[in-house]
Image (cartoon, helix red, strand yellow):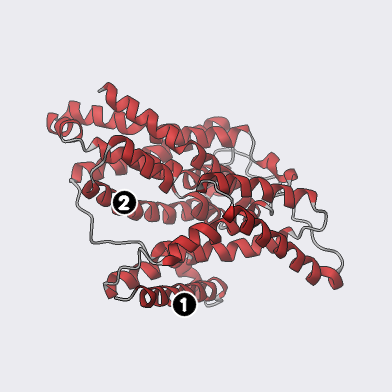
Amino acid sequence: MNEQYLLLIATAVVIITVLLVRWMSEAEQKLIKLFLDWFPAILFAYVIPALFTHLSGLDLSKVKLHDWSRSWIIPFTILTIMSALPFKQLKVVGVKPIIVFGVGSLVIATLPVVLVILSGWYDSRYQEMFIDQEYWKGLVPIVGGWIGGSTSQLVLKELVETTESLFLSILVLDTILVNLWTIFMFQFIKRSDSLNKAWGIKSEFPIIQPSKVSNASSRKKTNLFMLGIILILVLVTHFVRMSFLESIVLLSILGLVLGNFIPFWNHQLVLKISGFSIVLIMAILGLKLNFTNLSLPFAFILLVLMWLILHFAFMLLTARLLKTNIAWVAIGSVANLGGISTAPAITSAYKKELMPHAIVLAILSMVTGTSWGMLTIYLFHLL
């Protein structure tokens, strides 16, 4: 089928999806609200395009929208989200939440090796499958995908020379699990205060409300000027030669500068804009999902499930021992597994003001992902 025709179809699907998600988010009907308590509207941004491609049989995973999203929409979103973060709010992300987050990353990097060893002790056939048949090479890209995102995933795939067929199956499994995990984290974070109360943990965040533009008559000009600054910075960084990760880090720093050193910066506006952009990014990502390519041994899938659950258990235990707000478990876990687009989306279900803090953890995840994966490779080579 003609590439331009596919692009037109993909664009229409994304636009319709965004409109539907926004309608669901603002719907007042009790039935819709009840349904959204279990399946958040933001996830429809991912599922609707995926269902369309699955039912239509169209491959929309290579249309130009994905390049545009990576080159323009994601950088724009990062800049707007980070500019919504006054330095006064950085005290919320203290030592304890970062420790909880770090434990999650450490477990992701080391636990697959431990589980492979334990499975080999239980039955030598598992040792043969993971080591001799080299299925461990499928676990390493998962480490990169969970902690560092697509970039780390591809780098680690090349480092361990994962076969294309195994890598494709890993991508499908990873996509399904991360989306199911996102639903679970959405429910968990909304109920985290109950767990805080049961465990005697102080659940209050020292949130400082975003500043407002006091003069209503000048607000329109101010907002247009702000958007102009954002667009110019995204444009400039786009044409400067740097990696995706470098541009994300740079735009994050620039966003913090804008939000803290420009007195008239409208933090509430950029927070609303970034929320819309996140829905758009997820809708475009949904075009890539393919449910038909999953072909992995059951033991492999079971190990990954145990790995994911134990990752959460260790983070939860760490949060309780440190007596820090249990919501950081969900925020840190999704920052590890979901990354830049999903972490603030889940966080917004708890407190929208914490979306920039989720981005900080997601960026930390991106920066360290490849290093954690190299640790996993080293440990597997010891076997």
- Count of numbered circles on the image: 2
Image quadrant in which the C terminus is located: top left
Instruction: Name the amino acid, label 2.
Output: Leu
- The residue under label 1 is 16
- The reply, left or right, for residue 21 in relation to residue 58 is right
Apparent side of residue 183 relative to residue 280 in the rendered image (left or right): left
- SS type, badge 1: helix
Looking at the picture, how far across and down is residue 372, in whole percent?
A: 42, 33
Q: Position of residue 338 (x, y in %)?
A: 45, 50
Task: Kindly indicate the quadrant of the structure image that contains residue 202.
Answer: top right
The residue under label 2 is: 171
Residue 43 figure quarter: bottom left
Is residue 150 visible to us here?
Answer: yes
Farthest residue, direction left: 125
Q: At 55% from the left edge and 76% from the top edge, which residue is drawn?
A: 27
User: Which one is earlier in the sequence, the residue at label 2 or at label 1?
Assistant: 1
Q: Are discs 2 and 1 less than 8 Å apart at CB?
A: no
From the viewer's perspective, tell me whether residue 7 is left or right of residue 209.
left
Q: Quadrant of the N terminus?
A: bottom left
Instruction: Give the residue displayed 18% in from the left and 45% down from the top.
Output: 297
How far across and down, in percent of the image, does residue 5 sit?
37, 78
Amino acid type for the residue under numbered disc 1? Ile
Crowd band around label 1 with a 10 angstrom C-alpha radius: few (<14), some (14–19), many (20+): some
Q: Callout 2: helix, strand or loop?
A: helix
Q: Please report the residue visible at 62 percent of the width from the left and 44 percent of the height from the top.
A: 203
Q: Residues within 10 Å of mark 2 (few under 14, many from 20)?
A: many
Q: Is residue 135 left or right of residue 181?
A: left
Q: Is residue 374 above or below residue 334?
A: above
> Is residue 194 or residue 368 the one in the foreground?
368
How far is mark 2 from mark 1, CA to CA? 26 Å
Percent coordinates x, y for residue 225 in the rendering: 76, 65
